[in-house]
Image: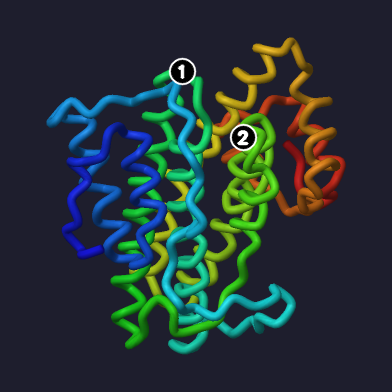
Amino acid sequence: MSEQFDLSTCKSVRHAALALLRERDPVTKAGAAQRFYERVLSGAGETALDTEAVIAEPLDLPGRPTVPELVAPSSLKRRSMQSDAGRAVLLHALAHIEFNAINLALDAVWRFPSMPAAFYFDWFKVAAEEARHFSLLSARLAEFGHAYGDFPAHDGLWEMAERTRGDVLARMALVPRTLEARGLDAAPPIRRRLAQAGDHASAAILDVILHDEIGHVLIGNRWFRHLCDEISADPHVTYEQLAERYRAPKLRGPFNFEARRDAGFDEIELRVLAGLDDSNSP
């Protein structure tokens, strides 16, 4: 596909999301996701949602480039942010997370039928904002003389998407509310270290990402609780059951309680987190 590939022939917003998910070039995917969401918002083309369609899954998901090399998380070495080389590695790791987040949001749009219309608009919005984050990080990475794909990365985010491919409730519980919520905790200390190193341009990108990610996790919380309400399930018990069934990572502090509260976690959940982390209180 070319950088300006045409989504106007897609039968619906959900088919467009699948076409974008299959796109292998990160720059093309990010740019087209943002442009298509703007088109949907403006009403141009009046593309249908087609909420009830059950779309056959192709074999080439997700679309991604041949680099970066995907390795076990344990083989990724940490580097000091005091050096340009260390900050380049960090920016690359963040760009990889955001590229995967584009794919995860697009996957939610096309994969799960029979959800309310707002579900699909919410996750396309998330895809567009994750695309913006990827673009910001890629541009900053280029200022260090590097590009996405220059360093190895891991595939933990997409592995959870694979596990929850047949269960929208599990997807909402374990991707936005678990994996992406970890970013709410990680962003402030990373931002502080970047600022301490004098890299205020990169720190400013972290501010943008944290602001938007609070909204993304809030969307995940909203749809998780919506689905729990539909089946009259207790969200706290249901989350624990799903986390065990799908082998979610164990939660460890420190936690960003303020951001998590803004992202829709309730006081019961925050008290549970406080019990896992002696260094913070909700």
The location of residue 229, given as percent across then percent down, is: 67, 13
Question: Between residues 212 and 58, which one lies in front from this camera angle?
Answer: 58
**Are the residues at dot 2 and dot 1 in contact (C-beta closer than 8 Å)?**
no
Quadrant into which the N terminus falls: bottom left
Instruction: Inspect the image, locate mark 1, and give the three-letter code of the amino acid beneath it.
Output: Pro
Q: Amino acid at mark 2?
A: Met
Which image quadrant is residue 158 in?
A: bottom right
The x, y position of residue 264, in whole percent, is: 59, 28
As drawn, the label of residue 172 is 2
Placement of 219 over or under 250, stated as above or below: above
Closer to us: 275 or 110 = 110
Secondary element at image label 2: helix
Residue at x 55%, y 80% (from the top left corner)? 69
* x and y percentages locating residue 203 in the rendered image: 42, 65
Q: Is residue 94 left or right of residue 178?
A: left
Q: Which residue is mark 1?
A: 116
How much space separates mark 2 and mark 1, taking CA atoms? 14 Å
The answer to whether residue 273 is above or below residue 33 is: above
Given residues 190 and 42, the one toward you in this image is 42
Say which mark, if any, is on residue 69.
none
Q: Nearer the viewer, residue 213 or 159?
A: 159
